[in-house]
């Protein structure tokens, strides 16, 4: 396992906008779901609890995934503030989405862990303002079953529609105004976690 610093950040580190009690993650939905969620502070009945839902602490990785809110069914970008306790519970109960011999031993053990885990983790290259991949990784956290239900019913503190912010930053990037664009980004700091929380998730 390689957890050595690559540039300014360790390769596997959770960075997020956070307070003493909450952490902000991002998702993108079609307007009927996203706008209703922001309006009511919870997901509408049309939000499926049967599908895995992926939350992302990185604003720029979300922009990469949703094309700055231009991709079909991802036009509404949400900043979802959730409890720290819920976030840590998900990490403690997550399994890596891919097999790593040094962590899992044999492939059968990993497959069994993946099947029973209510959450899963991927580490994808972080992105810069031009959405170019960087050397360090960004956490993607998938929630299913019990984790998805807890997310929707227990962990959410607030939901904000940040689609206008995404559009404003994107416009500045297109104009080459990278310093101004960077000044509008949500502040994402290293998120304090006990080492044992991530020990089974460092790829």
Image (cartoon, rainbow, N blue to C red):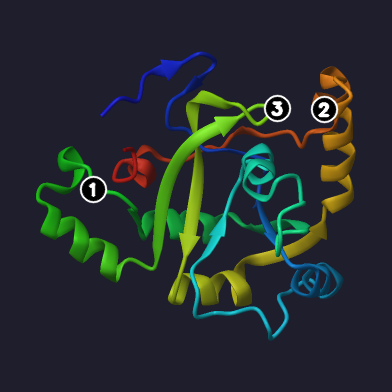
User: Badge 1: how crowded within 10 Å, few (<14), some, or many (20+)?
Assistant: some
Q: Are marks 1 and 3 in contact (CB under 8 Å)?
A: no
Relative height, residue 36 to residue 160 (above, below):
below
**Which is nearer the N-term, disc 1 or disc 2?**
1
Q: Position of residue 176 (x, y in %)?
A: 85, 20
Task: Name the element at disc 2.
Answer: helix
Relative height, residue 112 to residue 46 (above, below):
above
Task: Name the element at disc 3.
Answer: loop
Q: The C terminus appears in which quarter of the rendering?
A: top left
Residue farthest along the front direction in this orientation: 72
Q: The N terminus appears in which quarter of the rendering?
A: top left
Q: Position of residue 85 (x, y in %)?
A: 53, 58
Q: Are marks 1 and 2 in contact (CB under 8 Å)?
A: no
Residue farthest along the bottom direction in this orientation: 45
Q: Are marks 2 and 3 in contact (CB under 8 Å)?
A: yes
Q: Nearer the viewer, mark 1 or mark 3?
A: 3
Could you tell me how far apart the alpha carbons at marks 2 and 3 are, in whole angstroms?
A: 7 Å
**Which is nearer the N-term, disc 1 or disc 3?**
1
Q: Position of residue 147 (x, y in %)?
A: 47, 70
């Amino acid at each position: 396992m390689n957890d050595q610093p690559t540039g300014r950040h360790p390769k596997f580190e959770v960075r997020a906008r956070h307070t003493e009690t909450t952490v902000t993650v991002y998702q993108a939905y079609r307007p009927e779901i996203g706008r209703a969620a922001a309006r009511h502070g919870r997901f509408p009945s049309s939000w499926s609890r049967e599908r895995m839902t992926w939350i992302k602490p990185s604003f720029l990785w979300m922009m990469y995934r949703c094309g700055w809110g231009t991709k079909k069914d991802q036009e509404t970008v949400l900043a979802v503030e959730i409890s720290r306790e819920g976030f840590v519970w998900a990490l403690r109960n997550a399994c890596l989405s891919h097999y790593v011999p040094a962590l899992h031993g044999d492939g059968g053990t990993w497959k069994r862990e993946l099947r029973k885990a209510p959450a899963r983790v991927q580490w994808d290259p972080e992105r810069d303002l031009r959405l170019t991949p960087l050397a360090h990784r960004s956490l993607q956290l998938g929630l299913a079953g019990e984790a998805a239900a807890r997310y929707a019913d227990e962990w959410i503190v607030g939901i904000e529609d940040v689609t206008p912010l995404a559009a404003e930053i994107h416009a500045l990037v297109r104009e080459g105004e990278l310093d101004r664009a960077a000044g509008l980004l949500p502040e994402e700091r290293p998120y304090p976690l006990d080492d044992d929380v991530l020990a089974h998730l460092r790829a």
